C-alpha cells in the first residue's frame, strides 16, 4: 500500500491536474495513519475496541474513512496496472508479456475481492 501511495505522489509531481493537491493532502493523512507504530488498520470501521497481541501489548485500531479507503484503492489499482512503455527495457515483446502477466494477476485479484462477502455493523453482507 505504501508503494502505491508513493507512486501516487510521483504521478502528482508529473501532472498536478490529474492528481491534485487535495488528493495529496488525503494521501498524507493516510500515511500518518499507516506509519503509526502499533497500528492495526480497520478500513471503514469506526469501532471503539481494544486489542492486544500475544504479549499483552495493545494495538491501536486505526479507522479509515470512506474517502481514505477509496483513495487507497485508487492508488493500489493504479500501481498494479502495467503499461509496456513504462518498463525499463528495450525488449518490447518481453515488456508486453510482463505487463500481460501483471495485469491478468491484478484482474484476478480484483475478481476475488469483488466476490468476497463483506460484513458491516448494522448493514447487509
Image (cartoon, grey):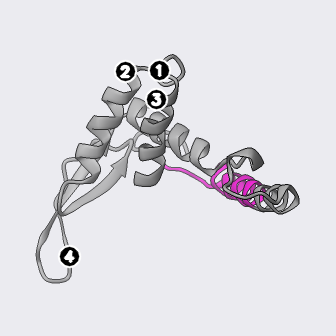
Specify whether residue 46 is painted magenta: no
Alpha-carbon neighbours of circle 3 within 10 Å: few (<14), some, or many (≥20)? some
Name the residue rendered at 28%, 41% in the picture.
46
Q: Which of marks 1 and 4 is nearer the N terminus?
A: 1
Work out whether residue 25 or residue 125 is closer to the camera in this orientation and state it.
25
Mainly helix, strand or loop, the magenta region? helix
Q: Give the range drawn in magenta.
A: 102-120
Residue at numbered disc 2: 21
Q: Quadrant of residue 120?
A: top left
Which one is in front in this view, the residue at disc 3 or the one at disc 4?
Answer: 3
> What distance separates the C-alpha of mark 2 from that of mark 4?
38 Å
Residue 120 visible here: no
Seen as rendered, the residue at the extreme bottom is: 55
Q: Which of marks 1 and 2 is nearer the N terminus?
A: 1
| Residue 12 disc label | 3
Which one is in front in this view, the residue at disc 1 or the one at disc 2?
Answer: 1
Tell me: residue 49, above or below residue 66: below
Tell me: residue 30, above or below residue 20: below
Which one is in front in this view, the residue at disc 1 or the one at disc 4?
Answer: 1
Q: In this view, does 24 lie to the left or right of 95?
A: left
Residue at numbered disc 4: 53
Residue at numbered disc 1: 16
In x, y percent, where is residue 37? 17, 61
> What distance separates the C-alpha of mark 2 from that of mark 3?
8 Å
Amino acid at each position: 500500500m505504501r508503494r502505491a501511495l508513493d507512486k501516487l505522489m510521483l504521478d502528482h509531481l508529473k501532472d498536478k491536474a490529474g492528481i491534485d493537491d487535495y488528493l495529496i493532502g488525503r494521501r498524507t493523512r493516510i500515511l500518518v495513519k499507516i506509519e503509526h507504530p502499533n497500528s492495526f488498520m480497520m478500513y471503514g470501521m469506526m469501532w471503539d475496541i481494544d486489542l492486544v497481541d500475544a504479549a499483552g501489548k495493545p494495538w491501536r485500531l486505526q479507522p479509515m474513512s470512506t474517502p481514505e479507503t477509496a483513495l487507497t484503492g485508487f492508488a493500489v489499482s493504479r500501481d498494479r496496472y502495467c503499461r509496456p512503455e513504462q518498463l525499463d527495457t528495450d525488449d518490447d515483446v518481453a515488456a508486453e508479456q510482463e505487463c500481460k502477466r501483471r495485469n491478468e494477476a491484478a484482474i484476478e485479484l480484483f475478481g476475488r475481492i469483488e466476490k468476497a462477502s463483506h460484513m458491516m455493523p448494522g448493514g447487509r453482507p
